[in-house]
Image (cartoon, rainbow, N blue to C red):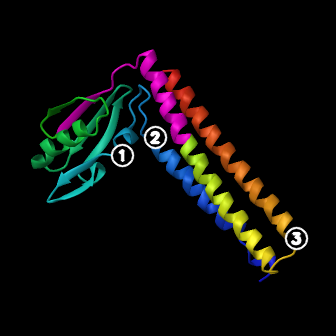
Amino acid sequence: MASADYDVGELKRRMQGAIASLKQELSGLRTGRASAHLLDPIQVEAYGQTMPLNQVATVNVPQPRMISVQVWDRSMVNAVEKAIMAANLGLTPSSEGQVIHLRIPELNEDRRKELVKVAHKYAETAKVSVRHVRRDGLDALKKMEKDHQIGQDDQKRLEAEVQKVTDQAIADVDQMVATKEKEIMTV
C-alpha cells in the first residue's frame, strides 16, 4: 500500500462531522431572540411513536421575541405543548386553537454567562472529537510505517497534512463558539 492509499480527506470528513454536531448543539442555545431552530431537539409523542416537532407542526418566527407553532392535527396540540414543556427550554406555551405561541423572555446577565459556559463546553467536546480523529489518523500512519507500507518521509509529510486539517477544524470550532458567544451577549 502506497501513501496515495492513505486518505486525509476521510479524516477531514470525520472532523467535519464533529463540527456539524457542534453547530446543531449551538443552534439549540437560546440567545434571547426567537429562532425556529430552538425547537429542533423537541420530540413529540404522536400516533403511538416519538417524532420530531417539525413532522407534526410548522414553526414560524413572526416577531423577534415570539415563536409560533402551527400544529397540523388539532388532536396533537396538547401533546406538542407537553413536549415543549418537557424540553425544559424555559418557554411557556399558550395556545389559540391549533397555534401555540411561545414568548421568548429577556435573558439576564447571569443566564447569558451560563449559556456562554454551555457553548464553550459544547466546543470543548467538539475539539476532543477532532483530536480523537487526529489520533486515529496518526496511529494509522505509524502502523503503516512500521509495517513498511510507507516510508518515513511519507509518514512525516502525511502527519503534517493531518495536523494542518486538525488545526483548521479547531479554528472552525473556535470561530463558531466566538460567534455564538457574541450573539448571546449582545441581544
Q: Nearer the viewer, residue 132 or 16?
A: 132
* Amino acid of disc 3: Gln
Residue 80: name its quadrant.
top left
- Residue 41 lies, in percent from the top left, at 35, 46
| Left or right, 141 with reference to 22 | right
The mark nearer the N terminus, 2 or 3, is 2
Q: Which residues are magenta?
A: 99-123
- Marks 2 and 1, Cα distance to the nearest angstrom? 9 Å
* Residue at figure coordinates x 72%, y 55% from the top left: 165
For the residues bearing labels 2 and 1, Cβ distance under 8 angstroms:
yes
- The number of numbered discs placed on residues in the rendered structure image is 3
Give the label on residue 5, or none: none
Query: Of the residues tagged 2 and 3, which is closer to the observer?
Result: 3
Residue placed furthest toward the bottom: 1
Instruction: Find numbered disc 3 in the image and state the secondary structure of the residue it sits on.
Output: helix
The residue where tag 1 is placed is: 40
Q: Callout 1: few (<14), some (14-19), or many (20+) C-alpha neighbours within 10 Å? A: some
- Marks 1 and 3, Cα distance to the nearest angstrom? 48 Å
* Residue at figure coordinates x 52%, y 37% from the top left: 121
| Left or right, 149 with reference to 60 | right
Give the label on residue 27, or none: 2
Q: Callout 2: few (<14), some (14-19), or many (20+) C-alpha neighbours within 10 Å? A: some
Residue 163: name its quadrant.
bottom right
| Left or right, 19 with reference to 68 | right
